[in-house]
Image: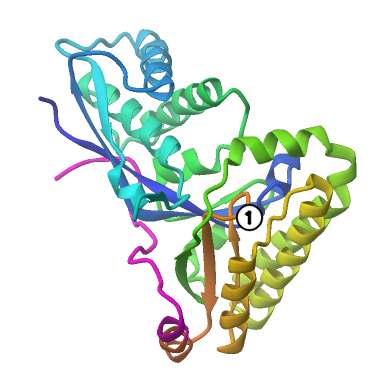
Amino acid sequence: MSHAVLAPGKAMLIGEYAVLEGEPAVVAAVSVYARAVLGGGSPSSPFIEAAIRETHVELLELGRSIHGPAVPHVDTSAFVQGGRKLGVGSSAAATVAAVGALLHAAGLDLSDEKIRARAYAAAKRAHDSAQGTAGSGADLWAAVHGKLRVLGPYDTAVEARPLPAQLRFVATSTSVSTAMLVARYRQVYDAAQPAIAELGIAARGFLMAWQRGDVAALLSAIERANSGYLRLGEALGHRLLTDEHLRIAEIARRVGGAAKPSGAGGGDLAVVFLPTPTAVERFSSEIAVLPITESAVGLHVAS
């Protein structure tokens, strides 16, 4: 059996949908990990099958090969709680972990940025192929690189600054297919553009607030993003701010923070931004938060 290779899940903080149109977005890697080891047998899913195919393209270009069993077996049980998916990118993390296990078995250093770039490229092609539609790649980016990452047109130097709010994550009771909502978005593309513009403005406001360390402006950007979700839900004919999301946002607002859907909306995960430890304590006393945090590491070999 090979060494285990791990890749974290993700939570989108801002810029969902708008990132597909060239606006900036922010994604956080979270402390929920897909764990891949190599063995025999057959691929367990189309994502793993595609990961094998696309990684071999990279290995061929590098003149590398794998000796011995070369089928990634990926454990994503951490992405499920109470029989329900958390919505933190299990398929993307599994794809990245599978790619990483194959690259590591070929003797490549997963901490090398050039190898990480190849891991991302292979995982992006594999994931898009397996799900049948091209996504933003944010979930794959988080799984490869870890931490908080800025995607799109904004100065990435902001990543070195602390976020002027504390993050907490809350699971909802509804699971949703991101691929389905993205496909629907493309069907109603023109009607959705006013909402996308609002989501883009919210993302830029968030990044400027992060750069200045301005917590009030950061929370205001989150509220604007919620307005964008409402408008986009109308265009999609699918409610993106569910009753649960609205309740979570109201509790966050009551303690001085803000909350929004993380990702496509319509269920799955809520991300909560809280300005002080007192606000965190008050929020956590009213609603159950998930025991997950930002992940400092991306794709890596288990110690």
Q: Residue furthest bottom?
A: 278
What residue would you read off at disc 1? 155
Location of residue 132 with respect to 187 vertically, above or below = above
- The residue located at (32%, 33%) in the rendering is 97
Q: Indicate left or right for 183 with 129 as reference.
A: right
Secondary structure found at label 1 = loop
Image position, residue 260 (x, y; %): 62, 66
Residue 263 at x, y percent in the picture = 59, 51
Q: Is residue 224 above or below residue 125?
A: below
Identify the image quadrant of residue 262: bottom right
Residue 224 visible to an observer of this rendering: yes
Residue 145 picture quarter: top left
Q: Is 285 colored magenta in this rendering?
A: yes
Q: Nearer the viewer, residue 281 or 29?
A: 281
Mark 1 burial class by Cα count in 10 Å: few <14, some 14-19, many 20+: few
Q: Is residue 109 visible?
A: no
**Does 191 appear in magenta?**
no
Secondary structure mostly seen in magenta is loop
Magenta-colored span: 283-303
Q: Quadrant of the N terminus?
A: top left
Residue 180 vs residue 166: left or right?
Answer: right
Q: Residue 252: x percent and y percent? A: 57, 80
Q: Quadrant of residue 243?
A: bottom right
Total residue callouts: 1
140, above or below 293, in the image:
above
Which quarter of the rendering shows the C terminus?
top left
Identify which residue is drawn at 74% across, 63% down: 202
Residue at left 36%, top 16%?
52
